Image (cartoon, rainbow, N blue to C red):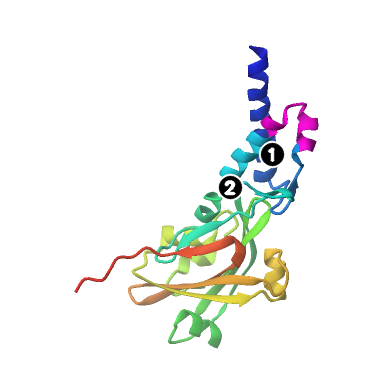
Amino acid sequence: MSTTAEPASLHQRILSDISEKILSGVWAPGHRIPFEHELTAEYNCSRMTVNKALSQLAKAGLIERRRRSGSFVRQPHSQAAILEIHDIRTEVEVTGLPYHFERVSRLKRRSSTEDRELLGLDAAGPVLAVECRHFAGKRPFCQERRLINLSAVPEAEDEEFLEISPNPWLVGHVPWNAAEHRIRAMAADAAIASALDIAAGSPCLVVERRTWNAERPVTQVRFVYAAESHELVARFAPSQG
């Protein structure tokens, strides 16, 4: 009985140990997993037990196995529906990694010409500019730069956005009846490269969104993702008539 029970327990232990290191961020995307013979020696088990554990991790999308090169932590990959408004937290959680965010800056100001163009405002007024970074595990996932029209959402003036990020706060406080998405590609400049911890010039996906409430502009936001870790998905049906 002990002969059959031991490999099963070791298999689960290997799965648990490697999964914990990946999901906690100790092993970042691209990190090489120890070779099979190294794991065999470390856990004092058969190579078949190690192979079974690595195969299960690969099937779960946590690692990728490269012939002759070994196994590596896979880059988390997320999807977002372009016709929906949802929280960045949701995008991160589907990758299986823990989510958190940090507010980088918050500034109330009188709208500039650029602010009015971004929001679609006809006249100058107070706006709130907020920048956040969203994380998947320990790695930056997305940079958010947002303008909030304080004439439409005056209560935002008192919100610090330290405990809750702007998107879920706005969804919970302000109804919207129209939205616009713009999607484009760009190369990371120095500021974006630093924010996302990627090399300058790396391809990025940019999603810009505006929302309105009863024809009044509410917010304009720009989300920037590293292109290799994110994609947009739309589901639609043929038009009638």
List x then y, in percent, for residue 177: 33, 69
* Quadrant for the N terminus in the image: top right
In the displayed structure image, the side of residue 194 where residue 12 appears, left or right = left
* Quadrant for the C terminus in the image: bottom left
Residue found at the far left of this picture:
241
Residues at discs 1 and 2 in contact (Cβ within 8 Å):
no
Mark 2 packing: few (<14 Cα in 10 Å), some, or many (20+)? Answer: some
List x then y, in percent, for residue 8: 63, 24
> Which segment is the magenta one?
37-50
In the displayed structure image, the side of residue 182 where residue 130 appears, left or right = right
Q: Nearer the viewer, residue 80 or 119?
A: 80
Q: Name the amino acid, label 1.
A: Ile
The circle drawn on residue 18 is 1
The circle drawn on residue 61 is 2
Residue ID at (60%, 67%): 227
Q: Name the amino acid, label 2.
A: Gly
Question: For residue 46, which quarter of the picture?
Answer: top right
Q: How many marks?
A: 2
In the displayed structure image, the side of residue 67 where residue 177 appears, left or right = left
Residue ID at (49%, 85%): 117
Q: Nearer the viewer, residue 149 or 95?
A: 95
Q: Nearer the viewer, residue 37 or 152?
A: 37
Which type of secondary structure does the marked residue at label 1 adopt? helix
Residue ID at (73%, 46%): 26
